[in-house]
Amino acid sequence: MNDEEYKSSIESSHERCKLLNVSEDQIYSNKIISDIELQEKFAEKRKMILTAAPYMEQLINFVKGCNFFALLTDGEGCILNAMGDEKILSEAFHQKMVPGAYMDEESIGTNAMSVVIKTGKPVQLSGEAHYIKSYHKWTCSAAPIKDMDGNLIGVLDLTGYIEQVHPHTLGMVIAASNAIEEMMKVKELHKLQNTNNKHLKTIFNSMPVAIVTSDDNGNINVYNNKAVNLFGFDHNSSKPITMNAIIKDWDTMKDLILSSETYEHDVNITSLYNNVNCHLSANPIYNPIDKGVEIVCVFDEIKKVKTQAYYSFDQIIGKEENFLKIVHYAKKIADSKSTILILGESGTGKEVFAQAIHNYSVRKDNPFIAINCGAIPKQLMELELFGYEDGAYLGAKKGGNPGKFEQADGGTILFDEIGELPLDMQIKLQRVLQEGSITRIGSQKSIPVNVRVIAATNKDLKKEVEMERFRKDLYYRLNVLPLYLPPLRERKGDIKLLFHYFMKVICDSLGKKEVEVPKEYFKLMKDYNWPGNIRELENVVELMVNTETFPPEYFSQESNQTDMIEENLDLTYVEREHLLKVLQKNNGNITKTATDLGIQRNTLYSKMKKYNIQ
């Protein structure tokens, strides 16, 4: 948009605002939809919300600390997502610039988003160019998000204080909106239009699905990073990879793909690296370069809802008296209908205890479902928990879809990281706990659910309540049966027991022999503070099994544990330093050093040569 177009569009917009009787003293949008309508909107625009979220986060991280916030609206101006620096975002929320509020011209006057909706073009708008006075303090950069047919389906906006105005801000927003458009096109079509490897890398490596292209003989041409993670492809391998290495019945399936415009099928992937179920979408396309046929395969991993608890109290390791009392208490409350709140630092085994409680109760033959409250976007949380009815929103699954509460009926539901649950969902969870029933989105019918609720958190919920980040009524509703899991530093007597347990389990799974550990090293482990708790101990054992050495350096600087952990993640560093220490201890005696390390002299010489140790 050039200067003349910009001035004309702003002047025209201001004139329309006067005709619409929009007040310059207005603070809030004239249109803010209800919670039920907003949930339907979230469900309808789910794909765009999820696609745009990481790009919004990148924008905010780039300008972090400069007081900016990002907004995503639909094509009509309804805010779908908001994120940014706390100070300015709180100010925006105070003016009710929240999900569900409309930012179109008719609702809130001239602003960057309303201009994009009217013109379909990117724009940067600052100060008095806004129609209402309360927005004069801001500078806004907005760009359209369009579908494949060029229709406006959303607007991406980045807003900050007017002192932060800069032309490059609009360029960043345009780049992000273009990336969102491209990603949505790829997700919707499930096929590639370009065989250029550079193009694939820039676009497809950020996709959450595995993409593989092959010729009609099954020779793989291109694949993205998700395919590497899922199938274990080796970039450096000189051996050609074929589709037969991924799909057992590829030769039969290939004929069906070549005879179809789009082939859809659930397949089981068995590779050297992984065994996983995927939904396959495959398209044959004509390759103008070699005038052959190329097959584009999109693998979307089928992640089944976890409905089974695997751990029991017999698998919980520990002999310290206080810890055994906690286990006894957990068994005692297992059959109660009351809610349990499991408290403890990260890595102390909160989900293990939740599963053990479920398996010790009369509900053990019914579902156990774990929900990570910090991993589900807040816009989709209600949809996940309560499900929806047939026709609840455009594109809703025929027959509706049950939420996690219905799936857990008769069993147990674990709310992990309960402290991350959004405040509005805390109100709804409190109502479910109180009434024992849920209502699907798009329905008025109340569905009774018989579910035992366990919540877990590493946060101090009392403090969260005091800071008004967690509802007091929900806290007391959850904290009926509190269960505190101590950190590993308060279970010093169990360290050796847990160490040997993990050593056996990890060695069995990796097919390696157990590493001998001198007795004096257990004192180092006992004196260590273990900030990562049991999970960190397990990781240390796995490091030892893979390097076939014990890293005493890991535990030597307790005051600087974080730095040591990061440093010792380099396994070659750990092994070289340990070799040097043992050699120095034995004054360079090769035979004695090899004996202490539990390896052959030839192996020791090989390692010394590898690390250039004289």
Image (cartoon, rainbow, N blue to C red):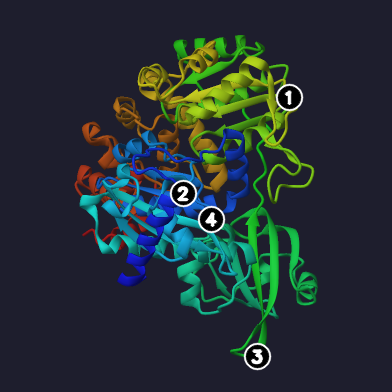
Q: Give the label, 1 or 2, closer to the camera.
A: 2
Q: Which residue is mark 4?
A: 75
The tag earlier along the polypeptide, 3 or 1, is: 3
Q: Which residue is mark 3?
A: 291
- Mark 4 residue crowding within 10 angstroms, few (<14) / some (14–19) / many (20+): many
- Mark 3 residue crowding within 10 angstroms, few (<14) / some (14–19) / many (20+): few
Q: Which residue is mark 1?
A: 446
Question: Is 555 on the left or on the right of 449, as rendered?
Answer: left
Picture disc at residue 20:
2
Q: Which amino acid, by three-letter code, is at mark 3?
A: Lys
Q: Which amino acid, by three-letter code, is at mark 4?
A: Gly
- Mark 2 residue crowding within 10 angstroms, few (<14) / some (14–19) / many (20+): few
Do tag 1 and tag 4 residues touch (Cβ < 8 Å)?
no
Q: Nearer the viewer, residue 3 or 226?
A: 3
| Residue 202 horizontal/vertical position (percent) | 45, 69
Question: Is 513 on the left or on the right of 583, as rendered?
Answer: right
Image quadrant assignment for residue 268: bottom right
Q: Which amino acid, by three-letter code, is at mark 1?
A: Ser
Query: Please, what secondary structure does the residue beneath circle 2 have?
Result: loop
Q: Give the label, 1 or 4, closer to the camera.
A: 4
Query: Please, what secondary structure does the residue beneath circle 4 have?
Result: loop
Do tag 1 and tag 2 residues touch (Cβ < 8 Å)?
no
Q: Residue drawn at (27%, 36%), measured in percent from left and top?
A: 561
Q: CA distance from mark 3 to mark 1?
A: 59 Å
Q: Which amino acid, by three-letter code, is at mark 2?
A: Leu
Image quadrant assignment for residue 168: bottom left
Q: CA distance from mark 4 to mark 2?
A: 20 Å
Q: Residue drawn at (47%, 65%), measured in percent from left and top?
A: 120
